[in-house]
Amino acid sequence: MSTTNEPSFRESVDMMFNRAVSVMDLPPGLEEKIRVCNATYTVRFGVRLRGQIQTFTGYRSVHSEHMEPVKGGIRYALGVNQDEVEALAALMTYKCALVEAPFGGSKGGLCIDPRQYDEHELELITRRFAYELAKRDLINPSQNVPAPDMGTGEREMAWIADQYRRMNTTDINAAACVTGKPINAGGIQGRTEATGRGVQYALQEFFRHPEDIAKANLEGTLEGKRVIVQGLGNVGYHAAKFLSEEDGCLITGIIERDGALVNPKGIDVDAVHAWIGKNGGVTGYPDAKHVAEGASVLEEACDILIPAALEGVINLRNADKIKAPLIIEAANGPVTAGADDILRNKGVVIIPDMYANAGGVTVSYFEWVKNLSHIRFGRMNRRQEESRHQLVVDELERLDRYLGDAWSMSPKFKDKYLRGAGELELVRSGLDDTMRAAYQDMREVWHGRDDVPDLRMASYIVAITKVAASYRAKGL
């Protein structure tokens, strides 16, 4: 995506950091300590595949250890390189600080196209990568806890957790060495959908504030808003699904690697997701117009644009053509620093990646806590909660009988009220609370200071302030 004067992803993160600290009163030494990446480990390892040894290059970057363990996903992609991994690790530091997850920032990557290997080959590669990292404590429940990212998922996390357990047979907290695991391997309900669900909660919170809606030249609620989603992977799919099914949004465009689908009347997200799973892309999908040059659909008219795939998709080449008044960054770094300036000057409101896609690390935090406590959320109190509610319902039913037709309970009230919160409900409640609180922290800075023009700068200021406080508490 490089164009003349286009900053790289790493440069974009640094520029946004510098923009924030320029209006903060930080000692120069502390500012530099927060900005720099502490360490990056590069590993090159061989795996015997198809009758010969293949060598792979992987990275694990630790940006900040102001809190430990450090946290961050592992991505499998051909474009993985040290600069990208370090930029993503920095974002993780700020993201965790913003949502008050007690982690430092880290990130990992393996330079590989996972589609070129079968499941058994991927398992061999993943286990060897995990071994190389774990023996250097770059996977460890108390020091460095990876999670899924682009190109990885539950399956890879289960392999990594098992590999760590084989190497640390007496570690009772071994399951907490990685998050995003399958439910049957120590995972938590709601983790797979967490980042997409976080995007939904972020938009819901934005639309609770009329002043903010007006800044984006929008009005009303999420109901009926036209949404274009770029990337129907895990994050984009769940965000689009929840927004259309639960909030009444109209998904008018879906952009994928082999083109885009457009339908002003709305697109069935589940149907498209199933089609991609079966056919490998959106080409040929019958109920929407196919646009071969998918990136051009980013420039179509809509109310909300959700870039949920790669970094740098909105850049100096196309920023001035973007028509969406509200962009929510479901991916990491989809808007370059140069494009950010153009969009801000146009009056576009951007809900930044640091906040918008923090749902994943928030629920990863819940999973880590669950693994360390060795008990499922809700197990101790769910039935007790139901018993207490039953007392209230019994009294209401007695009143119902006494008053006859003059009063009665609403339909379904009894069922809803009697159902105690299980793990999934508690995870969603915790995520919703986290997204609301973090938005209000950003909003306070955004509206409370004349030198903070947008939510991105506000998010950096909130996060850097919290990281600085942690370092000061350590005596730095």
Image (spheres, rainbow, N blue to C red):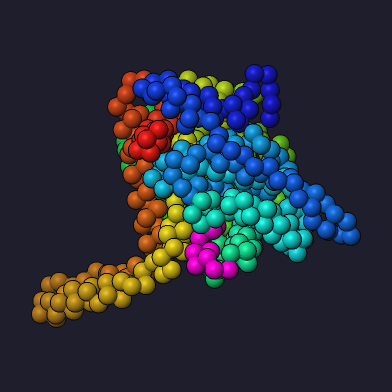
**Range shown magenta:** 169-178
Residue 139, how many percent across, how many down? 58, 54
Q: Residue at x 83, y 58 (%)?
A: 48
Q: Residue at x 64, y 33 (%)?
A: 83
Can residue 88 be spotted in the picture? no
From the viewer's perspective, tell me whether residue 5 is left or right of residue 427. right
From the viewer's perspective, tell me whether residue 406 is left or right of residue 433. left
Q: Residue at x 79, y 56 (%)?
A: 47
Residue 76, how many percent across, how many down? 68, 49
Residue 125, how many percent across, how many down? 73, 57
From the viewer's perspective, tell me whether residue 451 is left or right of residue 35. left
Can residue 117 be spotted in the picture? yes
Residue 335 included in the magenta stretch of the image: no
Predominant secondary structure, magenta span: loop
Instruction: State the quadrant of the N terminus.
Output: top right
Q: Residue at x 55, y 36 (%)?
A: 38
Which of the 4 quarters of the picture holds residue 262? Answer: top right
